[in-house]
Image (cartoon, rainbow, N blue to C red):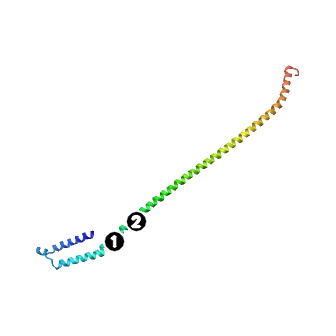
């Protein structure tokens, strides 16, 4: 399409140039040897330029466009792959965080359970020790009361004797 327009443009220019070079008004419409030679040279130049310049240039433009388009498509595909990898990474990261949180909660539950068991055992041991201490204290209190009872009776008689002035 572009080549056809260029050919028509060159033909138009050639015709205009040939009209300026005409000697007289009647020579404008007459066809002589130089015009035919110029048209032949022009057509030959178009074919030569088309094969040597225009076709390779158009092929170069097409190749460059394919490379550019291919590179852009490749960059888009790589961008999509990067997004997919990032999404997979985020999913795995979230899974790892969830798993770590579950493990941390499980460890906390186990630690709380162990703490509760230790506290329960400590309370039981303290209660046992307290009961043993109470029992020991009660038994010692009984022993002391029994010892003191006999001493109290003796002291009470002595006091009564001193107060009354006679032995009781």
Earlier in the chain: of badge 1 and badge 2, it is: 1
Q: Nearer the viewer, residue 93 or 1?
A: 1
Q: Quadrant of the N terminus?
A: bottom left
- Percent of width and height locating residue 11: 21, 72
- Percent of width and height locating residue 87: 48, 56
- Percent of width and height locating residue 155: 84, 26
How many labels, in total?
A: 2
Tell me the residue at 28%/74% (across/down): 50
Q: Is residue 96 above or below residue 63?
A: above
Q: Is 73 on the left or on the right of 143, as rendered?
A: left
Tell me the residue at 84%/25% (across/down): 156
Question: Which residue bears the numbered disc 1?
Answer: 59
- Percent of width and height locating residue 32: 15, 78
Tell me the residue at 17%/74% (across/down): 18
Q: CA distance from mark 1 to mark 2?
A: 18 Å
Q: Quadrant of the C terminus?
A: top right
Q: Is 80 on the left or on the right of 153, as rendered?
A: left
Q: Is residue 23 above or below residue 131?
A: below
Q: Is residue 149 above or below residue 102?
A: above
Q: Is 154 on the left or on the right of 130, as rendered?
A: right
Q: Which mark is residue 86?
A: none
Tell me the residue at 23%/76% (across/down): 43
Q: Is 133 on the left or on the right of 112, as rendered?
A: right
Q: Nearer the viewer, residue 51 or 146?
A: 51
Residue 80 occupies quadrant: bottom left
Question: Secondary structure beneath disc 2?
Answer: helix
Q: Is residue 167 above or below residue 89?
A: above
Label 1 packing within 10 angstroms: few (<14), some (14-19), many (20+): few
Question: Secondary structure beneath disc 1?
Answer: helix
Q: Nearer the viewer, residue 43 or 149?
A: 43
Label 2 packing within 10 angstroms: few (<14), some (14-19), many (20+): few
Question: Which residue bears the numbered disc 2?
Answer: 71
């Amino acid at each position: 399409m572009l080549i056809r327009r260029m050919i028509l443009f060159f033909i138009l220019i050639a015709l205009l140039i040939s009209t300026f070079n005409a000697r007289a008004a009647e020579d404008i419409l007459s066809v002589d040897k130089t015009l035919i030679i110029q048209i032949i040279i022009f057509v030959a130049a178009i074919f030569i330029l088309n094969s040597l310049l225009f076709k390779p240039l158009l092929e170069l433009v097409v190749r460059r466009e394919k490379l550019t388009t291919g590179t852009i498509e490749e960059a888009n595909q790589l961008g999509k792959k990067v997004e997919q990898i990032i999404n997979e990474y985020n999913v795995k990261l979230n899974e790892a965080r969830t798993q770590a949180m579950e493990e941390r909660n499980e460890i906390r539950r186990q630690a709380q359970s162990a703490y509760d068991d230790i506290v329960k055992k400590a309370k039981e041991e303290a209660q046992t020790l307290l009961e043993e201490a109470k029992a020991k204290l009660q038994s010692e209190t009984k022993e002391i009361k029994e010892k003191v009872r006999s001493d109290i009776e003796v002291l009470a008689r002595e006091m009564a004797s001193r107060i009354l002035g006679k032995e009781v």
